[in-house]
Image (spheres, rainbow, N blue to C red):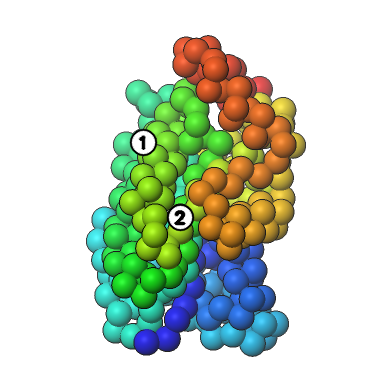
Amino acid sequence: MSNFALVTGASGGIGLDLARLLAKDKHDLVLVARSEDKLKEAKSSIEKEFGVNVKIIIADLSLPEAATQLYDEIQKEKIHIDILINNAGYGDFGSFASCDWTKQERMINLNVLSLSKITHYFLPAMIKSGHGKIMNLGSIASFLPGPMMSTYYATKAYVLSFSCSLANELKGTGVTITALCPGPVDTGFVAAAALEGSKLFHSFKPMTSPDVAAYGYRRMMKGKLLAIPGTMNKLMVTSVRFSPRKLVAFIVRKVQEKR
């Protein structure tokens, strides 16, 4: 079997930047996303610049069976995944009571169900081989309650808890888990989550996607569990540990409300 790195949500933003970093280090790639045109463009650009083999798979991982179909397709190609980056995810802004439930359900499928299934499918072979790296995309939201984005924050809390638990289970196997937990990032996430009018992205200067990807990549390659880019983000995570949950929820609500 050939060794490849698998990146979901790889058509743009942090996912694409991580794919480029992997390619720079001469890892062959499997890139997964919904947008066929963007994936073809990424494949052409990366192969031309870095000389690696790039396979693309068009998949909507917010659909319950998509993760299984993805795994089956990769198995047919006789590919061994030794680096897995679960980057795909999205958010949605608004009160839970008035939200579009279909969008919330697909968010849970993508941020939680598919991430867990993909990890479950590829992890045993990594353990058997005695090496592997997995990165799960969390968020500063992983550490906070999130009024007005309650489901999104809850899914990211799951990602962090799941990653920490796996890190403990995998001690001594040669496989490491990294949870990349950035704050606001300048990507297409803002528009997708309808956050353009929120004070969050106007009160705090977003980090750039390449900077976040580079920081997360370094931490993953060192086998570190947590990757929290930015001094202010690290300070916020620390301060939250000593603050009442109701107060934290109140502050998050004030920051996220529309201007």
What residue is rendered at 58% in x and 47% in y? 227
Name which residue type carries label 1.
Asp
Residue 42 in the image: x percent, y percent? 60, 74
Q: Nearer the viewer, residue 97 or 11?
A: 11
Quadrant for residue 125, please give it: bottom left
- Under mark 2, the amino acid is Ile
Q: Which mark is residue 100?
A: 1
**Mark number for residue 177?**
2
At 55% from the left and 65% from the top, the residue drawn is 11
Q: Is residue 36 left or right of residue 198?
A: left
Query: Whole-Å distance between the Cαs marked 1 and 2?
Result: 33 Å
Task: Kindly tell me whether residue 14 is visible in this rendering.
Answer: no
Residue at position x 72%, y 36% from top? Answer: 231
Element under disc 1? loop
Give the image location of residue 139, x and y in percent.
53, 41
Please report the residue visible at 36 percent of the width from the left and 45 percent of the height from the top.
165
* Quarter residue 43 falls in: bottom right
Q: Position of residue 78 (x, y in %)?
A: 33, 85
Q: Nearer the viewer, residue 166 or 27?
A: 166
- Is 14 placed above or below 164 here? below
Q: Is residue 141 above or below residue 61?
A: above
Up the image or down, 198 lies above or below 172; here it is above
